[in-house]
Each structure stands twice: as C-alpha cells, then as structure tokens.
Image (spheres, rainbow, N blue to C red):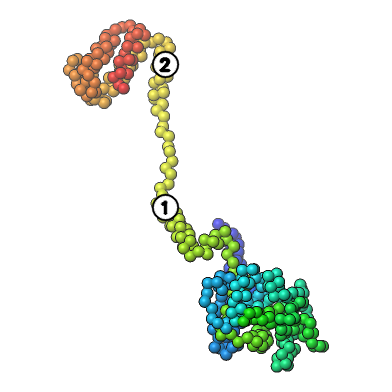
C-alpha cells in the first residue's frame, strides 16, 4: 500500500472515530412521547410521582407498584383494606374481566382512582359516563381547578400547555355523581368542562380524572405538584396499589418467542439450548479436520503401452512373439517376487515355485512344462497362445 492510500485510510479512520465520540458524548434529546410508567424519567413518565406519592400522605403510606394485569392482581393477591388502586395513563380501557375485579374491589370499601383522557366502553357503560377529547394539542394554557371552597383559592395557580390534550366529561349520572373539578380560564370559571368526579360504588368509590398529564415528570417539576396533592387529598387510603401495567409506554415483548420468554422454566431451557449449540459450534469447529482432497493416482502408461503393443502383435498374428513376451514377463515376475533362479526349469524349481506361490505342485509342473515346450518350438499358432494365456491367468490370479 502506497503512502497516499495510507493517508486516506488514516483520515477516514479519524473521521469515523470523531463521529462515534460525538454521538456518545452529545446530550440525549428529550423524548416527549407519553409513557406514564414508573421507570420512565422522560417528560411524560411517572417516575417522580411514584417516588413522591408516599410523601403526599405524610410518608406513612404503603406504596406498591403493580406490574400485573389488574385482573390477575386483584384475583390472586391479598390487598389491604381501605386501600386505593391508582391508574394513570393516556387511555384506560378496561375489559369486562378487569372491571369486574376492580368493581368488586371497590364494593368492599376501597377506592379506584383512574386518571385518563378516555375510559373505554366498559367503564362508560357501567358508570354512565361519557368523555370528549380535543384531538389536537392545545395552544392555549389549561387551568384545572376544584369546586371545593378551600381549594378554589388555588384556581389559576396551576397552568398546563405543552403536550396537553384537553379532555372533559360530557355526560354523567347526576343522581350518583359528585363533581369535584373542572377547567377554568382567566375570564370566568367554566363549570361545564368537568375533569374530576366521584362516583360512590358499594362501600367504596370511583374517582375519575381526565387530565393525566398532571402526574407526569415535566409538570411536577414545573411547580404544579400542589395540584396533584389536592387531587389526592380527597382520598385517605392506608395503602396504594399504583398500576404499572396498563401503560402506553410499557415495554412489551413482541417476539414470537414471547410465551417461552415469559415462562421462567422455558426461558432457561431456551437459553441453555442456545448456549449448548454455541459451545458445540465453537469447540467442534476447532477440532473438525478439514476435508482431504481426493487425488487421483497417476495412470500407469506402461501398461497401456503394453496392451497397445500386444494388440498390434495379435492383429499381425505374430503369436510366437507374444508367447515369448508372456513367458519373459512371467519369469521376471517369479524372479522379483519369489527370488528364484529361472535359468534351470527343472523339478527342483517346480517344487520351490509351488511352495512359494501356494499353488499345487501339479499345477505348477503343468505350467512350467508348457513353457519349456513352447520355448523349444520354432513355430507357434493361435492355439498355443490361448493355452499359455489360460494357464498364466489361472496361476497368477
């Protein structure tokens, strides 16, 4: 590599390193999406509220984070009496099973505090309520207030504007429902836009609130924490169960393996299989011998040449020459393989050859006598060649 190429690569590497360092050290941009989870420290998360909720009740409150479906939690758990189930999310659409368990919980003298812009068909039909949400971000400031004379003095103290969707109750059961809060403005109090109501239910009550943005990190850090404290001042539970399951920003496993990963035993079995396969590939790959290439043996061209010469002699009917070469080849083989002297083909030679070749003495004698006879003849015919070839093939195979 020449110097110019090295300089280009060096400059490229420095630029890439600078980009990586810049991405690492630059401030993380704020995420303004709605999460409402207790883990989220983004503007519209509920981390601060979950940490400070106990202090709103004088630090004597038992605060429990519920990470299960409300149906499962209220079915399987033993909850404290005079407790409150608190749900905060952009939308709280409970199904029939969830509402059945929650309503039974309330009937026993507990409180369900739900803050969301909409509540779904089941809650609307069961509690005779309707809500309406302006489907765009409000450009004007929103001032939530209370009907309580004690709290009315705080009207216009708390303002909300950024990321706010104004939602209010458009229909309620006036015989059972108590209006607690509304949206106000600087000109006059608009008592029609209700945003906070109480519905007695059995021995307990439902508190419904349509302004969940008030519980988020962003507004609790902007001096509006007193509004949340005033909201919760209508309740006095011994313990709170803060829902962290029905959340817009809840992390959900969308993988096709979610069932396996949600079961502890199946999850560990899955991880064990993956680990075993990786170990097998790593160690097996190191010890596996590479494929040995098959090398074809070199052809013995002398054999092909001999066959060609033999065919040539046979075509010319030169039987004597072929017989002579066959005899010469056989005797050479006897000398190289059995280390016998072939100058004198007598009975002693036949006996030694028979012993070393493991052929019978009779067969060996027949072959040697035929060779001696053919060597003594001056003229050979085709029958002589056939006879010799047959004897040699029987003896050498």
Tally of numbered discs: 2
Question: Can you say which quadrant of the picture contains the N terminus?
Answer: bottom right
Q: Residue at x 55, y 82 (%)?
A: 81
Residue 251's disc number: none
* Mark in front: 2 vs 1: 1
Which residue position holds label 1? 284
Whether residue 89 is visible: yes
Where is residue 280, by image quadrant? bottom left
Where is residue 188, by image quadrant? bottom right
Which residue position holds label 2? 311
Question: Can you say which quadrant of the picture contains the C terminus?
Answer: top left
Q: Is residue 333 above or below residue 137?
A: above
Binning the other alpha carbons within 10 Å of mark 1 as few (below 14), some (14 to 19) or many (20 upward) gives: few
Residues 114 and 288: in front is 114
Whether residue 27 is visible: no
Residue 35: give x, y in percent of width and height. 64, 74
Residue 26: give x, y in percent of width and height. 62, 75
Residue at the outermost left position: 348
Determine whether label 2 and label 1 are within 8 Å by CB: no
Please, what secondary structure does the residue beneath circle 1 have? helix
Residue 13: give x, y in percent of width and height. 58, 65
């Amino acid at each position: 590599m020449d110097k110019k190429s090295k300089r280009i690569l060096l400059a490229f590497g420095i630029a890439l390193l600078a980009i990586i360092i810049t991405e690492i050290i630059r401030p993380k941009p704020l995420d303004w999406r709605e999460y409402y989870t207790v883990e989220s420290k983004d503007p519209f998360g509920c981390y601060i509220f979950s940490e400070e909720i106990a202090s709103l009740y004088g630090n004597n409150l038992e605060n429990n984070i519920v990470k299960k479906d409300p149906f499962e939690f209220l079915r399987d758990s033993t909850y404290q009496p005079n407790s409150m189930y608190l749900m905060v999310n952009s939308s709280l659409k409970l199904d029939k099973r969830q509402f059945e368990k929650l309503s039974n919980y309330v009937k026993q003298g507990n409180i369900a505090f739900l803050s969301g812009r909409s509540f779904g068909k089941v809650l609307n039909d069961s509690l005779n309520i309707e809500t309406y949400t302006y489907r765009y971000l409000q450009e004007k400031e929103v001032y939530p207030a209370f009907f309580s004379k004690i709290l009315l003095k705080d009207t216009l103290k708390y303002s909300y504007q950024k990321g706010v969707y104004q939602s209010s109750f458009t229909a309620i059961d006036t015989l059972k429902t108590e209006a607690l809060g509304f949206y106000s403005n600087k000109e006059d109090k608009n008592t029609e836009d209700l945003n906070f109501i109480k519905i007695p239910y059995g021995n307990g009550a439902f508190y419904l609130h349509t302004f969940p943005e008030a519980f988020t990190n962003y507004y609790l850090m902007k001096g509006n924490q007193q509004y949340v404290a005033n909201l919760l001042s209508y309740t006095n539970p011994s313990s709170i169960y803060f829902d962290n399951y029905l959340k817009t920003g809840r992390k959900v496993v969308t993988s096709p393996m979610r069932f396996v990963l949600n079961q502890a035993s199946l999850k560990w079995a899955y991880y064990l299989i993956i680990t075993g396969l990786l170990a097998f590939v790593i160690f097996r790959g190191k010890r596996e011998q590479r494929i040995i290439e098959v090398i074809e043996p070199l052809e013995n061209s002398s054999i092909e040449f001999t066959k060609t010469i033999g065919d040539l002699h046979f075509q010319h009917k030169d039987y004597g020459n072929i017989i002579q070469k066959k005899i010469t080849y056989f005797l050479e083989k006897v000398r190289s393989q059995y280390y016998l002297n072939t100058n004198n083909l007598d009975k002693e030679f036949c006996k030694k050859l028979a012993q070393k070749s493991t052929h019978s003495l009779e067969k060996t004698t027949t072959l040697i006598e035929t060779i001696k006879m053919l060597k003594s003849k001056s003229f050979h015919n085709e029958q002589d060649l056939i006879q010799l070839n047959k004897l040699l093939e029987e003896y050498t195979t």
